Structure formats: structure tokens, C-alpha cells
Amino acid sequence: MDVKFTAHQVLEIAEQVEQNGSRFYHKAAKLFVEPSLNDLFTKLAEWETTHQKLFVKMRQQFAEQLDELGDFDLDIYISNPRLMASLTVFAIGADSDRQFTGNETLEVVLKKAIRNEKDTITFYEGLKDFAQSLACADTLDKIIEEEKRHIKILTQSLEQR
């Protein structure tokens, strides 16, 4: 069986990953009382939520263009994008409390966040091998660019400390 994903499924996976990323950053925000640190992680959580909404909108646009993208055959497509999203560092049901002891320094949290973002990019790069169409691969490229922006912001924050 040849496994492929539609753009719709890729976006559904991305939505879940971004939702889980938002939870991760909300938990990180609670670790720091200092307003600038709390604001940094809260802002990252909000950006993840914004990205999730972007992917919802993109998925709706793809649904409207389904005729152009072609129908999908359930025999050759994975039908559970949530399962795929669970393979990322921002996994479904991941217990963010276990990711933090509450005693981490800002440097440790920022490095963990950067590593998570890099791992998410690696996941999306691997997912491109399963892309059903050019539109699907292009969608993944857009998602990857969003994640790279997160890394840049986190890296700048780490360098400024």
C-alpha cells in the first residue's frame, strides 16, 4: 500500500501540532513570573494559535478547490492525521507538565523550545515524502517557514539573555 496525504490531511495534522505547541508555550509561560519572559512565551502560544487558524483557513480553501486537487482514495491515504500529529514533539495528549519540572532556567526552556521547533520542522520535512500533490508539498513548505520564524524569535531571545 502506497501511503500518501492530501493537502487537507497535511493541514489537519499541522492544526493539531500548532494546537499542541500552543499548550507547550502556555505551560512555559507559567514557569516565569518576570513579565517579559511570561510575555515571550504567551506571545509564542498566541502565534501558534494564529498559525492553527491560518491552517484551518487554508484547509477550507483547499476543500473549495477539491476538484482541482483531485479526490482521494481511502485505500491509499492515511485517514487519521491526528495519529501522525501524535508523532511530533508537540504530540497529541503530550503532558507538558512532564516536560517541565518548574525549576528550569530561561536558557533551558528556550533551548527546549528551539529543539521542539527544529524537531517539528524535521517531522514536516519527512511528511513531504508522503505528499500527494505539488499543492500539498507547497503547503508543507509554508508550514515549515512558519516554524523557522519561531526558531528565529526563540534564538534571538536566547542571544539577548
Image: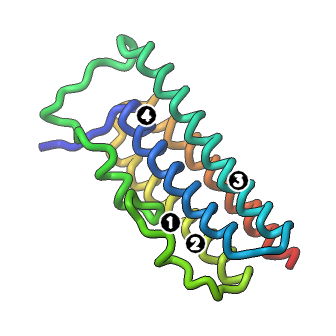
Residue lying farthest bottom? 103
| Of marks 3 and 4, the one in the foreground | 3
What numbered label is drawn on residue 149? 3
Real-space Cα separation, disc 1 to disc 4, in angstroms = 20 Å
Give the image location of residue 158, x and y in percent: 78, 75
Residue type highlighted by circle 2? Arg
On screen, residue 117 versus residue 98, left or right, reads right
Earlier-in-chain disc, 3 versus 4: 4
Mark 3, Cα crowd under 10 Å, few <14 / some 14-19 / many 20+, is few
Q: Mark 2 and 1 residues: CB-CB less than 8 Å, in contact?
A: yes
Report the residue at 61% width, 42% height from top: 51
The residue under label 4 is: 136
Q: CA distance from mark 2 to mark 1?
A: 6 Å
Q: Residue tagged by mark 1?
A: 119
Residue occupied by mark 2? 115
Colouring: rainbow
Residue visible at 64% across and 88% down? 103
Q: Dividing the picture into quarters, in which one does residue 86 lie?
A: bottom left
State the residue in front, 121 or 11: 11
Could you tell which of marks 1 and 3 lies nearer the N-terminus?
1
Judged from the image, the secondary structure of the residue bearing numbered disc 3 is: helix
Q: Earlier in the sequence, mark 2 or mark 3?
A: 2
Q: Amino acid at mark 1?
A: Asp
